[in-house]
Image: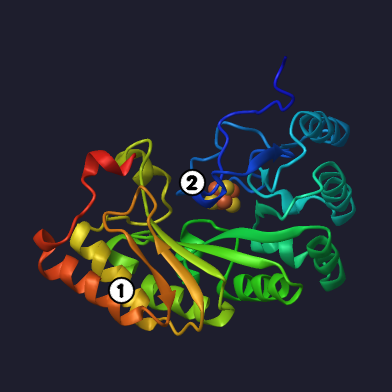
Amino acid sequence: MKFPIEYNEPLFRPPSEALSLIFQITIGCSWNKCSFCEMYTSKKFTVKKEEDVIKEIIDYSNIDPDVRKVFLADGNVMVLSSSRLIRILTQLNESFPHLRRISAYAMPQDIIQKSKEELKELYESGLKLLYIGIESGDDELLNLINKGETFSTTVESINKAQEAGIQTSVMIINGLGGKKYSRQHSINSARVVNEIQPHYLSTLVLSYPLGLEHYKSRAGYDFEPLNKKELFEELKLFIENTNLTSTIFRSDHASNYLTLKGILSRDKEILVERLSLAINSPGKLYLRPEWARGL
Ligand code: SF4
């Protein structure tokens, strides 16, 4: 029997969606201009036909109606109209009666376009979690990487989604600004997360899947990469400047040299101590070797 879902690869999902069923309702990223990102550069952004998506949902539910978690791919499905999204969410709920969570990647500008009422309706239709790559809270760096967002669009959009009940999981990229922008990247990234108080926060390390020289040629700035110690120093400064109440923090992506997990602010001192140890006595901690970073 043919698998009922047709994927257009490469297919990405957050690590925490490893057990989720993925429906791809858009192909690629509607923005696709961030200078550090190679995720969807091989794809032209298209919207999958709604009837094909609905058919895949129904066909899959005939095989396994017990699905609990669904992730909607690709890059930023929130670019679709709320009415279209709600029809898809409604079909998911009808087809999978035990469904607990639907999640997706999102860009701040797509969230801002939606009214408070639309966001509330999306939440009530099952959209419980949005993954948002903030990357940095520093406006100068956001402009240089061509993110198409600012500190204020990030804060406004995420607060708007959260007020509608939708949880957010946000990502900051350690090392994004290289040596020149490291300090302002740390401090302003802490400021932005303090303003939004996300449910989940993770950091990953900037990587160069097509090589450092290729990255430098795409970057819109004079980029000098941070070494391992400088990456730890940048992350330490970021955590020291956070003022969060109950955010689940993870720095355990394959790109990270050091695994860190905790709740901020509760575990702030412990995390800072581990980073101090990694900076001053790296031999006393397990640091992921280069070959294990999966890059
Ligand atoms: S919005 Fe996200 S997926 Fe799209 S280019 Fe930027 S980082 Fe990549």
Q: Quadrant of the N terminus?
A: top right
Task: Compute the Cα span from label 1 to label 2.
Answer: 28 Å
Relative horizontal placement of residue 226, taking residue 166 as reference (left or right): left
For numbered disc 2, what is the local secondary structure? Answer: loop
- Residue 49: quarter of image: top right
Indicate the position of residue 209 as horizontal and vertical percent values.
38, 38
- Residue 250: quarter of image: bottom left
Indicate the position of residue 162 as horizontal and vertical percent values.
69, 73
Indicate the position of residue 54 as horizontal and vertical percent values.
85, 36
Relative horizontal placement of residue 294, taking residue 232 as reference (left or right): right
Circle 1: is it few (<14), some (14-19), or many (20+) Cα within 10 Å?
A: many
Instruction: Give whichever of 270, 14 is nearer the camera.
Output: 270
Residue sitting at x 61%, y 66%: 168
According to the picture, the residue beneath numbered tag 2 turns out to be 37
- Above or below — where is 133 with respect to 201? above
Mark 2 CB near ligand 1 (8 Å cut):
yes
Residue positioned most to the top: 1
According to the picture, the residue beneath numbered tag 1 turns out to be 271
In this rendering, which labeled residue sits more in front, label 1 or label 2?
Answer: 1
Residue sitting at x 72%, y 74%: 160
